[in-house]
Image: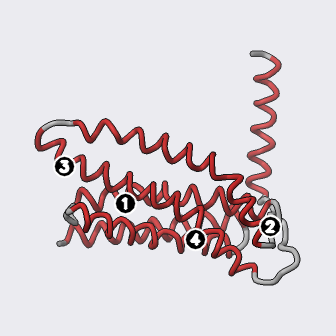
Amino acid sequence: KTSIFNLIISISLGIFAAFIVLVIFFRRTFIPVITIFTIPVSIASVFLFMFFTKISINIISLSGIAIGIGMIVDNSIVVLENLAKNNAITPEEISHRTLEMGSSTFGSTVTTLLVFLPILFIPGITGALFSQLALTISFLLGSSFLISMTLTPALYRLFIGNKKKISSLKESGFILGMQKIYKKYLFFGFRKP
């Protein structure tokens, strides 16, 4: 019980750390709030999946959730960033901009899922233990994709309300500095391949 409690604390700290990082990078609150709201929904769907597939709640399955926390925000961030960058306001614009990101987020999710596929074929006790981990992470990622295509744009629409325009994303000095350094080395690499 103590190790499960510690794992739940770790998951909570991971969610909090993700929120802080998102606030720092996006410099607005509604994108991190929407992103963080999708985490418990994804986790709840995993527990539903675990119930129906009779996967017990143990250190291995909860570790799968803890590992997947960082991965499940990716799809929502990509969708939200595209919505905000393109100033999507109307339901038509929001659905168009969300679908625009559908193929790239789907491809990214499937690629990550394929990494965990071989774990399902490990024989013996090791396979039984780690298959729970692989299944938990896989379902968590799959549900995060579905949530990023459905719940995330709906929450975005609720947060922006009836605004005619949302303020554009302003990049922090840190991000601009990193882009400057990256651009310098990228140009150098292209000149001398």
**Which residue shows up at 52% across the image and 70% down it?**
38
Q: Nearer the viewer, mark 3 or mark 1?
A: 3
Mark 1 residue element: helix
Dot 1, crowdedness within 10 Å: few (<14), some or many (≥20)?
many
- Circles 2, 4 touching at the beta carbon (< 8 Å): no
Give coordinates of residue 81: x percent, y percent.
71, 60
Q: CA distance from mark 3 to mark 1?
A: 16 Å
**Is residue 116 left or right of 148 when viewed as pictured?**
left
Which tag, 2 or 4, sits closer to the chain's start?
Answer: 2
- Circles 3, 1 touching at the beta carbon (< 8 Å): no
Which tag, 1 or 2, sits closer to the chain's start?
Answer: 1
**Which residue shows up at 63% across the image and 52% down it?**
102
Looking at the rendered image, the quarter that the N terminus falls into is: bottom left
Q: Nearer the viewer, mark 1 or mark 2?
A: 2
Q: Amino acid at mark 3?
A: Leu
Q: Which residue is mark 3?
A: 129
Mark 2 residue element: loop
Q: Amino acid at mark 2?
A: Ala
Looking at the rendered image, the quarter that the C terminus falls into is: top right
Q: CA distance from mark 4 to mark 1?
A: 22 Å
**Which residue shows up at 73% across the image and 68% down it?**
27
Give coordinates of residue 133: x percent, y percent.
28, 52
Q: Amino acid at mark 1?
A: Ala
- Circles 4, 3 touching at the beta carbon (< 8 Å): no
Give coordinates of residue 128: x percent, y percent.
17, 47
Which tag, 3 or 1, sits closer to the chain's start?
Answer: 1
- Circles 3, 2 touching at the beta carbon (< 8 Å): no
